[in-house]
Structure formats: structure tokens, C-alpha cells
């Protein structure tokens, strides 16, 4: 160490250019090694930022002997650690908001607002809750069934019975139509066979789409819906509507790649793009193709946007005034 100090003290008076070159080379090597070893531990991801940071550490070692590069690297690591500690409690887990299938633009008796709240609020009088449940009859089954299904575990017997009765009535209505079709002889005409398979596929799909079946029964219903859709397409492969229905069934079954292929084929056969765009945007999102997702969503016409789809489109739309 004493020899190194003597060398440093004698350096200003030395005229030996070899010593100067050796000193600069050693400092450069040290700075390069420290910079290269430190960069991976610093929170910079862009290439330009990492390059500038590497040069800062390197030149610090080159022009500030001994402590230049190690000092800068250590200061950055300490600063990064000091700022990172408070951020551990910055984020907290939030519960998912409850999905409300009933839109805000309701008409008729359900337009008084707060329909779901009046139905599910156990502190309200039972009579008022029953009146609100009766108002669900004016809504599509797809919108009413999720609310009714939540009431199957209600503490009030009358509420449970009414909800079960309404769900059972809708399920039996569709199941009765399916049973009636299956009891009829299979038509000999190709056109009539196509119509029969098409109706069966649509009825089985309605059971699933309306939320009337769950679990194993849902899988059973989807399998039959797809089977009849495929049978209809075997008779008429040019039916855009049946390809679209088959794509939706496949999507519900989790076969997204096959579903996307069918829906694209349905679009090519003439299904309007405003009907297929939401599905294609969903497929693009699940495939990680976010630019294409944004393109599909932001080119949708206002007439395509439902009360639940509009917030999604607003989220993906570029905020020009942000």
C-alpha cells in the first residue's frame, strides 16, 4: 500500500509516459469490469439508459482513481435499495367487483334502478324482494338467471323457492322444445334435416348461453350443441350463421384456436364484422397481440357497444388529451 501511495505522489512529477498509459489502462479496465458487473443489478431496462449508466461508471473509474467506479456503483445500489424499501406496502390486493349482468338502460318495471340491490339485500322486507324478483320476468333469461342463481342460497325459504321455480321453468321450457324435436322422425330432405339440426344446436346453446345449466350438465349441453352444429354444417357448409354459432360454442368449451378459425370463416362467409369483432378482439388479447386488440376495439362502431363493452373500448382507446 505504501508503494502505491508513493507511486501516486510521484505521479505528477513523473515524465514517464509509460507509467501514465499503464495507469489509464488499469483504471479503464477496472472501470469496465465494475460497470459490467453492476449494470444487471440496477433497475434500468432501456438500452439507452443502460449504455449511459455504463459510461458513467466507466468514466468515474477512469478519472477518479481507486474509488471512482466502485463508489458510483455502490451509491447507486444503496440508493436503489433505499427507495425500494417503502414501496413494498404501496400496493394492496383489492376484491374483484361483482359483475352485474343487468344493464343500466333498462325499460319497464325494472327501470326504477337498484333492482339487483333490492333483490339481494337481505335486510329488505321479503314482500318487496319478491316483487323485485317478479320484475325479472321482463328481462332476458341471460340477464335474470345469474341473479336468480345467487338467491338459491338465500336464508328466506320463499325467496329460494321462487328463484328455483323461475330457473326451473325456463330450463324446462327449452328442454321441452328439445325433447319435442328429438321425438320427431328425422326428415329425409336435406333442407329439413339442416333446419332440425340447426334448431337443436341453437336450443342446446341457449341453455348454456342463458346460464341455466352448470357443471357437468353444462359440458353435456355444449357437447350436444356442437354435435348438432357440426351435423348442420355437414349438410350446408356455406352457412355463415352456423359457423359463427359453432365458433361461440367452441369458445365456451375453451377451444379458443378452433373457435377463432370458425369465427373468421363466418366473417368471410358474410357475418357482419360488428358481430365478430368483440370475439376476435378477445382472441387477440388472449394471444398477447395487444396492438391488434386495440385496433379491433377502437374501430368498433358506437352501435356495437353495449353498456358493458363500452368501458372496455374506452380503456383501450388512446387518450389524446391525457
Image (spheres, rainbow, N blue to C red):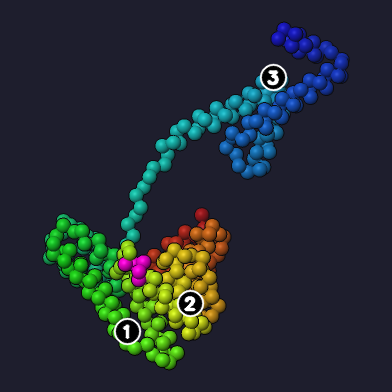
Q: Is residue 119 above or below residue 21?
A: below
Cα distance in 3D space between marks 2 and 1: 22 Å
Q: Is mark 1 on a helix, strand or loop?
A: helix
| Circle 1 or circle 3, nearest the eye | 1
Q: Is mark 3 on a helix, strand or loop?
A: loop
Query: Residue at image x 44%, y 63%?
Result: 254
Per the picture, the main secondary structure of the magenta-coloured stretch is helix
The tag earlier along the polypeptide, 2 or 3, is: 3
Residue 65, percent from left and from top: 71, 20
Query: Residue at image x 20%, y 67%?
Result: 164
Q: Mark 1 points at which residue?
A: 181
Residue span colored magenta:
217-221
Quadrant housing residue 103: bottom left
| Circle 2 or circle 1, nearest the eye | 1
Q: In this view, does 241 lie to the left or right of 124?
A: right
- In depth, the one of 134 and 240 nearer the eye is 240
Mark 3 neighbour density, 10 Å: few (under 14) some (14–19) many (20 or more)? some
Q: Can residue 107 be seen in this view?
A: no
Quadrant housing residue 295: bottom right
Q: Which mark is residue 227?
A: none
Q: Is residue 63 left or right of residue 50?
A: right
Q: Name the residue under label 2.
A: 243
Query: Residue at image x 71%, y 29%?
Result: 32
Q: Is residue 127 above or below residue 64?
A: below
Query: Residue at image x 55%, y 78%?
Result: 268
**Quarter of the picture holding the N terminus:** top right
Cα distance in 3D space between marks 1 and 3: 90 Å
Q: Is mark 2 on a helix, strand or loop?
A: helix
Residue 172, percent from left and from top: 25, 76
The tag earlier along the polypeptide, 1 or 3, is: 3
- In depth, the one of 74 and 231 nearer the eye is 231
Amino acid at each position: 500500500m505504501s508503494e502505491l501511495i508513493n507511486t501516486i505522489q510521484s505521479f505528477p512529477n513523473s515524465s514517464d509516459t509509460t507509467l501514465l498509459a499503464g495507469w489509464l489502462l488499469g483504471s479503464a479496465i477496472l472501470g469496465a469490469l465494475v460497470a459490467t458487473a453492476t449494470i444487471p443489478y440496477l433497475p434500468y431496462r432501456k438500452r439507452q439508459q443502460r449504455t449511459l449508466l455504463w459510461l458513467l461508471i466507466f468514466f468515474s473509474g477512469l478519472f477518479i482513481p481507486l474509488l471512482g467506479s466502485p463508489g458510483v456503483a455502490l451509491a447507486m445500489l444503496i440508493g436503489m435499495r433505499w427507495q425500494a424499501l417503502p414501496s413494498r406496502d404501496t400496493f394492496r390486493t383489492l376484491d374483484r367487483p361483482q359483475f352485474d349482468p343487468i344493464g343500466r338502460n333498462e325499460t319497464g318495471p325494472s327501470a326504477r334502478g337498484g333492482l339487483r340491490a333490492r333483490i339481494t339485500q337481505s335486510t329488505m322486507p321479503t314482500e318487496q324482494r319478491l316483487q323485485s324478483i317478479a320484475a325479472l320476468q321482463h328481462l332476458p333469461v341471460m340477464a335474470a338467471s345469474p341473479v336468480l342463481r345467487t338467491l338459491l342460497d338465500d336464508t328466506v325459504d320463499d325467496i329460494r323457492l321462487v328463484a328455483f321455480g323461475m330457473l326451473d321453468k325456463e330450463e324446462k321450457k327449452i328442454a321441452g322444445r328439445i325433447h319435442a324435436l328429438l321425438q320427431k322422425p328425422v326428415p329425409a330432405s336435406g333442407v329439413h334435416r339442416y333446419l332440425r339440426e340447426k334448431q337443436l344446436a341453437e336450443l342446446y346453446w341457449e341453455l348454456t348461453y342463458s346460464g341455466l345449466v352448470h357443471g357437468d350438465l353444462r359440458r353435456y349441453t355444449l357437447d350436444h350443441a356442437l354435435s348438432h352444429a357440426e351435423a348442420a354444417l355437414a349438410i350446408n357448409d356455406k352457412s355463415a350463421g352456423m359457423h359463427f354459432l359453432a365458433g361461440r360454442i367452441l369458445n365456451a368449451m375453451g377451444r379458443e384456436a378452433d373457435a377463432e378459425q370458425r369465427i373468421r370463416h363466418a366473417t368471410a362467409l358474410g357475418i357482419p364484422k360488428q358481430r365478430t369483432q368483440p370475439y376476435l378482439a378477445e382472441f387477440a388479447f388472449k394471444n398477447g397481440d395487444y396492438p391488434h386488440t386495440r385496433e379491433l376495439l377502437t374501430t368498433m362502431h358506437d352501435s356495437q357497444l353495449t353498456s358493458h363493452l363500452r368501458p372496455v373500448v374506452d380503456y383501450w382507446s388512446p387518450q389524446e388529451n391525457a
